[in-house]
């Protein structure tokens, strides 16, 4: 994968994390605030992107993605 693809994937992954934080906070759990349009789609895309990058980001682990999934699918 080229550097520009890796850079794009890191930036998109960062955006998806920001969406999750917003969803859980000020976003009132509105799926309209998620890039993917649904919690399931958002988490799936995050896992796909995280697995696609050779050098894993220091600011996000797979365990953190799984924790977002638990928090976002839990009944408020």
Image (spheres, grey):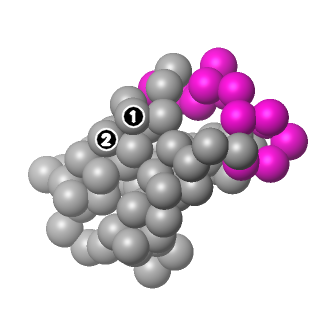
Q: Is residue 11 left or right of residue 61?
A: right
Which class describes the residues within 10 Å of circle 2: few (<14), some (14-19), or many (20+)? some
The residue nearer to you, when weighing 3 against 47, is 47
User: Label 2, on which residue?
Assistant: 44
Answer with left or right where residue 31 lies relative to residue 1.
Answer: right
Q: Nearer the viewer, residue 68 or 2?
A: 68
Give residue 19's position: percent from left, percent from top. Answer: 63, 41
> Mark 2 and mark 1 in contact (Cβ < 8 Å)?
yes
Residue 33 to residue 26: above or below: above
Whether residue 29 is in magenta: the answer is yes
Image quadrant occupied by the C terminus: top right
Residue 25 appears in view: yes
Q: CA distance from mark 1 to mark 2?
A: 6 Å
Residue 40 bears which disc, if any? 1
Give residue 34's quadrant in the image: top right
Return the residue found at the far left: 1
- Residue 9, position in %: x, y? 36, 48
The residue under the point 86% across, 42% down is 26
In terms of depth relative to the viewer, which is nearer, 49 or 42? 42
Q: Residue at x 38, y 73 (%)?
A: 63
Q: Residue at x 38, y 31 (%)?
A: 41
Main SS, magenta residues: loop
Secondary structure category for the residue under label 1: helix
* Residue in view at x 70 percent, y 26 percent: 30
At numbered mark 2, what does the secondary structure look like: helix, strand or loop?
A: helix
Where residue 58 sits in the image (x, y, percent)?
A: 45, 80
Single out the residue that lies furthest toward the front. Answer: 75
User: Dividing the picture into quarters, in which one does residue 40 lie?
Assistant: top left
User: In the rendered structure, which segment of residues is drawn in magenta?
Assistant: 24-36
Which residue is most to the right?
26
């Amino acid at each position: 994968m080229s550097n520009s693809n890796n850079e794009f994937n890191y930036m998109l992954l960062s955006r998806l994390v920001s969406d999750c934080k917003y969803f859980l906070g000020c976003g009132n759990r509105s799926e309209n605030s998620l890039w993917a349009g649904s919690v399931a789609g958002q988490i799936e895309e995050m896992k796909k992107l995280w697995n696609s990058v050779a050098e894993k980001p220091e600011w996000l682990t797979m365990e953190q993605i799984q924790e977002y999934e638990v928090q976002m699918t839990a009944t408020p």
